[in-house]
Image (cartoon, rainbow, N blue to C red):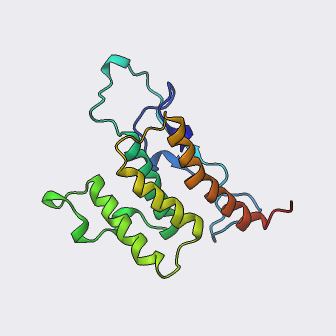
Amino acid sequence: MLQLSHTPWLQEGWSKADIIFLNAKGGRSMSRTKVDIQRPYLTREHKQIATLARKSSGEPNDSSKVLALGIMLLEIWYGLPIERLMEPDDLGPNNRETEITYLQAARRCVMDKAGKGDFSFAFIKAISYCLQCFMNPSASLSDLAFSKTIEEQVLAPLEAEMNMLLFGPSVR
């Protein structure tokens, strides 16, 4: 996530369509379709973009990027895109999908499943934190304190849980 923030090599706009996982060769897997979840790859067209031509108004801000991460985690958990989890009441004006549409659908899915214990601890914590960050107007991945909270509240718990599930409890 932090590596997917704007750099001279990555445009500011990215989405779940830009991240791919290859099939794992042997080894353990959490699903039937043995996917190598430890090595995600970016699929991006690398175009030269003039700095002056960049439009800031259409670019997602960092709170939107964190919301996108939360939604991607939800999609991973359900195995379905957020669009398939939406209900008619989630849609915005003119029955159009908006960021608020995705936030509402994600919030409803979390509330429906969390009380039943259907999420792992790390997933519910990470997804909930990402949804909350969307409402933070000062969310900025260039702010070291904010980046640290993403690391502590989202990335570290997910990585620890993944390692525990894939490799068993660590011996210390």
Where's the C terminus, which quadrant? Answer: bottom right
Q: Please give left or right for residue 139 compared with residue 91 in the image.
A: right
Q: Given the current orientation, which residue lies at the most extreme bottom position?
A: 116
Residue ID at (32%, 17%): 52
Residue 1: where, in percent of width, then height?
53, 45
Residue 73: where, in percent of width, then height?
50, 60
Q: Please give left or right for residue 46 compared with residue 97 in the image.
A: right
Count of labels shown? 0
Q: Is residue 161 above or below residue 14?
A: below
Please indicate, yes or no, whether residue 28 appears anywhere in the rendered image: no
Q: Quadrant of residue 57?
A: top left
Q: Is residue 73 above or below residue 118?
A: above
117 or 102, which is in the foreground? Answer: 117
Residue ID at (39%, 38%): 13
Please indicate, yes or no, whether residue 146 appears anywhere in the rendered image: yes
Residue ID at (53%, 79%): 117
Q: Quadrant of residue 158?
A: bottom right
Q: Please give left or right for residue 142 compared with residue 135 in the image.
A: right
157 or 41, which is in the foreground? Answer: 157
Residue ID at (40%, 73%): 111
Q: Given the current orientation, which residue lies at the most extreme right position?
A: 172
